[in-house]
Amino acid sequence: MLGIDIENSKRFADWSKRELSRIFTAGEIEYASRFENSIEHFCGFYCVKEALVKALDNKQIEYKKVEVLHTNSGKPYLSQTSVEYLLKGTNYKKVEISISHSGDFAIAVALLN
């Protein structure tokens, strides 16, 4: 199954730490905060979570239980606990994600196998 989402990163520009912490994990906040333009990373993480909602057709996903991590080369992937949480009760075995940023927009794709 496939899910995709695109968002304008300006949506996150004025969010407080408290607002960010309702949706993003501490690890995601720490990662994004390393970058000068952290809002594009927050936007990308949000797009991943929305793409997963669409791929799973499940609006009950708790966003803080889904954590985007990165390989040393920068490729995004989901934590093992996120994969277990998302795929519990499904026939899927694997989740792949991709994130891209351009200008004020971020897009993410989630593929379930």
Image (cartoon, helix red, strand yellow):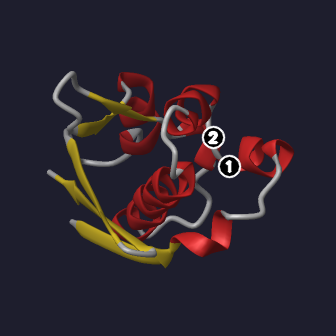
- Please tell me which residue is depicted at 62% across the width and 59% down the height of the picture: 60
Residue 87 % position (x, y): 36, 42
- Please tell me which residue is depicted at 44% across the width and 63% down the height of the picture: 47
Residue situated in front as seen by the camera: 82 or 34:
34
Residue situated in front as seen by the camera: 89 or 94:
94
Residue 83 % position (x, y): 36, 35
- Please tell me which residue is depicted at 50% across the width and 40% down the height of the picture: 66
Which disc number belongs to residue 46? none
- Residues packed near mark 2 inside 10 Å, few (<14), some (14 to 19) or many (20 plus): some
- Residues packed near mark 1 inside 10 Å, few (<14), some (14 to 19) or many (20 plus): some
**Label 2, label 1: how many angstroms apart (C-alpha)?**
5 Å
Residue situated in front as seen by the camera: 111 or 44:
44
Residue 30 vertical placement versus 20 (above, below): above
Q: Secondary structure at mark 1?
A: helix
Q: Earlier in the sequence, mark 2 or mark 1?
A: 1
Q: Quadrant of the N terminus?
A: bottom left
Residue ID for mark 2:
64
Residue 65 % position (x, y): 58, 37
Contact between labelled residues 1 and 2, with CB atoms less than 8 Å apart: yes
- Report the side of 65 relative to 22 (left or right): left
Residue type pointed to by label 1 = Ile
Q: Quadrant of residue 76?
A: top left
Residue 34 % position (x, y): 51, 32
Residue 66 vertical placement versus 61 (above, below): above
Residue ID for mark 1:
23
- Please tell me which residue is depicted at 51% across the width and 52% down the height of the picture: 37
Residue type pointed to by label 2 = Lys
Residue 81 vertical placement versus 57 (above, below): above
- Report the side of 70 relative to 13 (left or right): left
